[in-house]
Amino acid sequence: MPTPVFSANLTLTNLVTSVNNLSETFTSFLFMALGAIIITGLAAVLALIGVYLERKISAHMQDRVGPMEVNTEIPLLKKIGHGWAQTLADAVKLLLKEDIVPDAADKRLHLLAPFIVFAATLAAFAVLPFGKNLIISDLNVGLFYIVAISSFVVIGIILAGWSSNNKWSLFGAMRSAAQIVSFEIPASLALLVVIMAVGSLNLGDIVAFQTGGIHKWLIFQYFPFNLLAFLIFFIASLAELNRAPFDIPEAESEIIAGFHTEYSGMKFAMFFLAEYANMFLVGVVISTLFLGGWSSPFGSFLNGSAFFQVFWIALKAFAVIFVQMWLRWTLPRVRVDQLMYTSWKVLTPFAFVAMFGVGLWMVLLK
Amino acid sequence: MLYNFATVFVFIVFGALFVGINLTLSRLIQTRNPIPVKLSTYECGELPEGSSWIRFNIRFYVVALIFLIFEVEIVFLFPWAVVFKKLGMFAFAEMMIFVFILIVGLAYVWVKGDLEWEKPRIVPDQRYATVPQEAEAGELVA
């Protein structure tokens, strides 16, 4: 099991303890807090980049250019152009906006919902492997933990919809909850296929299983069952993210803004950030499980240092995110009963088939 | 391992803290001018009719119930999947029997029509009609 960089490197802890006379738990806590702060910052920055990318990619796909104006006067950054500071301007705008809580709303629940949604999304970043030793927390139940903590987002969404005391919010929230919950089943079944192939829930082990070249990636093993599992997980994760074509909860033209109708200013920004951070999370999870994680597709070439490992996982995660955005701006929104049909009558049976197929293959031929 | 879980806990706390700091920062520098129009519930310009905290359609409950059953099944499948490589045909067959029983459950729910979002609207027989159609108002059909 790889030794995480930020975990108890006890010699270093002892050194600090003896030098500074701090207690050992406090130093450990400092390392944990440092990791948390770095990853929080990273998630926020990535979410902002995701928003900018979405706007630019959608613009180019619709044959327009998107944001081009917002820029700074700083000479080097000014050269980048292409409206790169648009998201920054949006963030500042949302900071300055008034936080309107409707009279009829339940104020405490209204306040609590963004906390739950964002904290749950961020907490899943703790187990993501960005490199061989670049895991904040190398849990032995890493994958199970990710599935579990991502389910907390549903609670936040339902709270948001309920507390707003607005029929549109309630519709959006209940539909979103029904959607996320329905797609949990095929997603988890697809994950079971991966776990069966690797034999461990630890994300580091799963990546280690896939190092050595592109032929070892899990998406190409046990053909076609793992490919089926990949497709099922990809589609199900689109629904879990409330992204098109499953974006009824935020259907802009149908129920205004769904569960975050009554949210303005920074609270809305938290929901927004949580969605894009979640998108990045799903990108990294899919890359880790099916596309080889931080390992290079060329085997040992370009695999050595942490820089290359982060490069590969970033490349794969952004490729997944690009495909997700591509689908958003290409496919029309599905109706809610078509959505339920897809989850229960198409994806779940195929997921069972994939699991059965891989199990039979492993038992008979290995 | 306890250390790793403590790290995760610190993460959750920092996530909540991040939101808290941002909301506080926003509260400090935002304008605050609450007037009654702004604080009314949004319904595309119309005045909302009654509270929205009323009963909603039962299909959400049915979906949640079916989800619960399959989620418990998946929770049982997780540990089996982790050690599956070391087990043989017997464990596979045993677990597949369990999964098959639950697939029969899925098939039953499917055939019974509980997975349908739109239930067919049954026209009440005139002879046995007791409650008129209009009296079913007050329920959200989402």
Image (spheres, grey):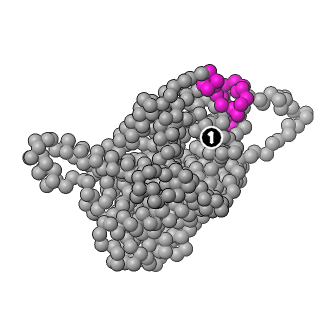
Residue drawn at x 52%, y 34% is A97
Q: Residue A295: x percent and y percent?
A: 37, 70
Q: Quadrant of residue B138?
A: top right
Q: Residues within 10 Å of mark 1 (few under 14, many from 20)?
A: many
Q: Nearer the viewer, residue A322 or A93?
A: A93
Q: Residue B5: x percent and y percent?
A: 31, 47
Residue A187 as seen in the image, left or right of residue B61: left
Asked if residue B40 is among those painted magenta in the image, a careful observer would answer yes
Q: Residue A296: x percent and y percent?
A: 38, 73
Q: Residue B93: x percent and y percent?
A: 49, 66
Residue B110 as seen in the image, left or right of residue A348: right
Q: Which residues are magenta?
A: B36-58
A209 versus A49 height, above or below: below
- Quadrant the C terminus of chain A occupies: bottom left
- Quadrant the N terminus of chain A occupies: bottom left
Q: Amino acid at mark 1?
A: Gly
Mark 1 highlights which residue?
Answer: A258
Chain containing mark 1: A
